[in-house]
Structures are given as structure tokens and as C-alpha cells.
Image (spheres, rainbow, N blue to C red):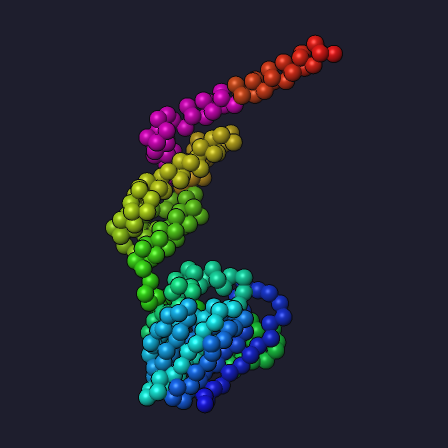
Amino acid sequence: MEKAFKLDFVNDKAGTLYVNCCGCSQTQPLHSFGPAAKPHYLIHFVLSGKGIFRFHDKEYRLEAGYGFLIQPGELSFYQADEKDPWSYLWVGFAGTKAEEYLGAMGLSARHPIFTCDRSEELYAIVRDMMEHNTYGVADDLRRNGQLGVFLSIIADSAGVVAKDEEDKGNQYVKKAVSFIQNNYCNPIRITDVAEYVCINRSYLYTLFENYLGMSPQEFLTTFRITKARELLDSTDYPIESIALSCGYNDAMVFSKAFHSMKGMSPSQYRKQSHKEKTREQLREVEGLIAQLLENEQKS
């Protein structure tokens, strides 16, 4: 048997992230659930005691401070310990952003287990969800907002168990590259990238060398110069404006970086690019004229 207080919520419209159910439970020895599947994501977090979680032919022995993720549509089984049965809380959720957020947190079918040292905060959030249980926009917004806080606490303090160092490194590099792609137009530095990814600069350097074969600074510069080339090819913006658009406050520094990478100044590159475009246009015109003459001769 199980002493549980749980709530299920009706969600009749799609959203980026929303709560389906939540609850708290004090189980009896050997109380179990499954093997069974759920239609949404489900996170359990152990408050006290012990138990096991089986998923994808793997068995995890868990205790207070551990949590596990159940994927929608996937069979799973969990059972309380015979001598020290666990108590836990849970939150079920779905949404168009759910998989993306969980992946960014490092949680997946391959790595469903995490640890978190902020159990009191997680418990308080679930209690708040259960207290605001009416079918109305105010409580609906509050529960879904609390879900975001719930996941943010896990993301902030969680350690994903059995996650390979290679996977971690790849995630750090992907986050760093994404940050650069979205912020290259600002005067960011590599220290800003490292702070965003939450690792030190030397470790970020090692990861970029291992995964991309270049330093973070080389990647940032290459990305900026590539964007600058696109602007030089497609616009008549002044060099100073292109420099600012690519994160360079000083046009001279930009020109020096461009020359170092392309072997010519931005102005020289633009002239050469325009010449090549002109030649290509002339070849197209000449081709059309030749085709017209050929058609005339045939007629």
C-alpha cells in the first residue's frame, strides 16, 4: 500500500511547458509500480528511504537526494526498499519545449538519474502546485510557472549520474557554439562564453581543441569574419558598420583580423567580390546573346 496525495490537471491546449500531475507519497515496504508507461514526462525525487528504478534493462538503486526521469510511452518499474521504504514527490509534465529543456539539463533515456541537494525547495514547489489546484487561468499559470522553477532548481544543482565525460564535453561545446552564434554581434570575450557554459576558460580551450581542432578565440574570430564576408558580399554598408555588426568596436582591429584570415583588407575583398559578380553577370548576358543568335540562325 501507499499513502499518497496526488492531483491530476486537465490540459486541453498545447504549450511549451505545462503540468499534468504532481504529488507526494510515503510508501510501504516493497510497494511497486509497473512495468507501465505514462503519456507524459514524469520526474520522481526521493525525499527519504531507498528503492530501485528499472528502465531500459538497467536497474538503479536510489536513496534520498536522487531523482529519476520517466519518458513518455516508455515502460518503467520502481519499487520501495523492504527495510527502508522511500518517500518521494513527483511532477508529470509535457509541452513542445519539454524534451529540449531536459536534454539541456543532461536528462534523457540514456541518463535518467540525477542528484539534487535542494529537496526542501522541490517539496515546497510541489506543495504549492497542489494548493493551487483549481481549474482557472490564475492557478494554471502559477502551476506552470512553478514547473519552470522546479526544473531550474534541478538544472542548477543536479549532477547527472553515469553521464560520460565525452557527453559532458560535447554538451559544453554545443552550448558555447550556440552562445557565440547568437552573440557574435556583441563585443563578447571568451571569458563571457566560459561563464555562460559554467566552466573555466582553460577547460573550454581544451574542449574546443579536442572537438573542433581550434581554440574558442579562433572559432569566434572565424565566425565573425564569415559573417563579415556575407555583409561585404550582399550590402554596401560602410566597413565601420560591418565591423560593429560583427562585434568589433574598432574598425582597425576588425580590418587587421580580416586581413590575417583572408589575406586582404575588407575593402579589397569587397572590390574583388564585386568584380567576380560583374564577370559572372557578363558571362550570363553573353550566354543569353549567344542563345538568341543560335535560335535566329535555326529559324
- For image coordinates 52% across by 31% down, the residue present is 234
* Relative height, residue 184 to residue 49 (above, below): above
What is the x, y in percent for residue 235? Answer: 52, 31
203 in magenta: no
Left or right position of 10 against 117? right
Say whether residue 144 is visible. Answer: no
- For image coordinates 30% across by 50% down, the residue present is 207
Left or right position of 138 against 202? right
Determine the image quadrant of residue 219.
top left
- For image coordinates 37% across by 55% down, the residue present is 171
Left or right position of 228 against 206? right
> Which range is magenta?
248-277
Q: Quadrant of the N terminus?
A: bottom left
- Taking the view exactly as shown, the residue that stands out farthest to the front is 57
Prevailing secondary structure of the magenta residues: helix
- For image coordinates 40% across by 40% down, the residue present is 223
* Total number of numbered discs in the rendering: 0
> Which one is nearer the viewer's eye here, 54 or 161?
54
